[in-house]
Amino acid sequence: MNRQISRGVALSMIAQAIAILVNLVFTPFMARILGQNEYGLYQLVQSVVNYLNVMNFGFTSAYISFYAREKAKEDGGEGIARLNGMFLRIFLVITAISAVAGALLVNHIELLGTRLTEAEYVTARRLMILMALNLAVSFPNSVFTVYIAARERFVFKQVTTILNYLLIPLCNLPVLYLGRGSVGVAAVTLGLSLLRLAVNMIYCLRKLKMRFRFGRMDRALFLSLVGFTFFIFLSDVVDQLNTSVDKFLLGRLLGTAPVAVYSVAFELSTYFTFCSWVIPEMFVPEMNRVVVEERDDRKLTEIFTRIGRYNNYILLLVLTGFILCGKSFIRLWVGDGYETAYLAGVILMLARYIPAVQTMGVNIQNAKNMHQPRSVIYFGIACVNVAASIFLIRRWGVVGTSLGTLGAIVLGAGLFMNLYYQKRIGLNVLTFWKALFRWTPLAAALCAGAWLVVRNLSLETWPALLGFIVIYSVLYLLLLWFAGMNRKEKEDILQAVQSFRGGAKG
């Protein structure tokens, strides 16, 4: 691994650890100050506004692939400058459209359902205004963040991410103490987004010398881009259906309190997914170069499998750890009234496991411009998920909607995608799962053994719970090092640690 990647991986791990730690501390504090109903309202409004995220139409995901193509032309950077100009214009238009869409949502606040009080409708309208503005700011910022990633400036990217994670609680705690409620939290989030946009702009324009060309738009390039991104856009719609529709349906059918319970489970499963993003994003530029210049499926399978193994190590630690002590953790973390979040959290983590270990596969599809079937199949399955969730919510509430998500993702990411990787993309899925299965039974055996012990323990205090987590994690990592990892993986980890330490000293 080169120095930017190794340091980027280390900083990314630190960033995700900080993000999880900050949220673990801040979320229960926020939930208790706001109360279950206002916290549920905040999550409900956020889930609705998040649907506007699809307005990026897949352009963000497409940038690195098109950047690799333009860079390969070696035309002095003119192609990249035209690409940057095109993307900036596109995202400014998207910003305007999202602002109009946000205004429409504000004027039709009744979409949130009929179970809200008049005071909740007033708060919801204010939240929606601030959240819609925050989303509008995120679109032009995307132009600069993807350029930073394409230039492989992972250290800067992760440092700014870490600072953002730290500023969220530092700025929000005084706001909550002053009684500004969820509206104050949304205002702080908007302010931090504006600050991050300014920092990224300055870095790209001054440090990276990012250039733009705003002449006549290259029609052929634009049409190629639209054709490429349409199915990524469809995939984004599917992701929003699978992640946000549950909160929306719970809010309309059952009210804000079940939304709060589901949000706890969903947030925990999001931390689980965070773990799968740490390493893959560092290898996306390299993977695009292999697709564009080398066209070597065996090398792509090697990257796909190598990243999958690393993800598997991390994900199984989190999943088995949560299965063992999730009940005690939730009780201590957010208090009484959230017990159902444990079972829902386990179900959602199991649902996310397959797509999480195969995160790199989606990037390979996009780079090969072979992502269209995935988007179509996923869209159909997501529609079935929505219909099934309405029935399951009425029958089993929060757990029911989690089961609907599990079924949809297993069919899509589990069955269809693995067949598609094998038959069409050119990846050797059998090699992939064989490589992962070398560790999975050992992790399951360790979890089963720990379960026999934890049944007889009382983990009702933070010291007892944290002590168990530390002991289990150490045993897991020792078993992984001596019985799970191969020699190359150990060498990569040692190299990354040495590189990071060298960078820190420098």
Image (cartoon, helix red, strand yellow):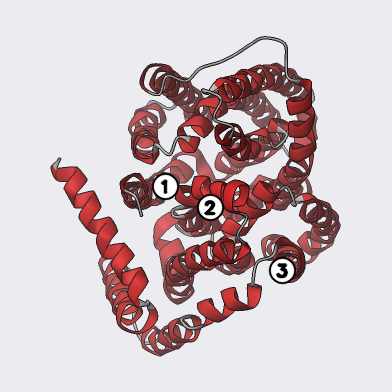
Is mark 2 in CB contact (under 8 Å) with mark 1? Answer: yes
Question: In the image, 118: left or right of 24?
Answer: right
Given residues 352 and 24, the one toward you in this image is 352
**Residue 113 visible in rendering:** no
Task: Look at the picture and state if 476 lies above or below 461.
Answer: below
Residue 114 placement: quadrant: top right
- For numbered disc 2, what is the local secondary structure? helix
User: Quadrant where the N terminus lies?
Assistant: bottom left
Given residues 17 and 125, the one toward you in this image is 17
User: Quadrant where the C terminus lies?
Assistant: top left
- For numbered disc 1, what is the local secondary structure? helix
**Residue 392 visible in rendering:** yes
Looking at the picture, how far across and down is residue 475, in whole percent? 30, 79
Number of residues whose C-alpha sits closer than 10 Å to that of mark 2, classed few (under 14), some (14–19) or many (20 or more): some
Q: What amino acid type should be assigned to the residue bearing mark 3? A: Val
Given residues 320 and 61, the one toward you in this image is 61
Tell me how far mark 3 sits from mark 2, CA to CA: 20 Å
User: Pointer 2: what residue?
Assistant: 267
Looking at the picture, how far across and down is residue 388, in whole percent? 83, 61
* Number of numbered discs: 3
User: Pointer 3: what residue?
Assistant: 410
User: Pointer 1: what residue?
Assistant: 23
N-term mark: 3 or 2: 2
Q: What amino acid type should be assigned to the residue bearing mark 1? A: Asn
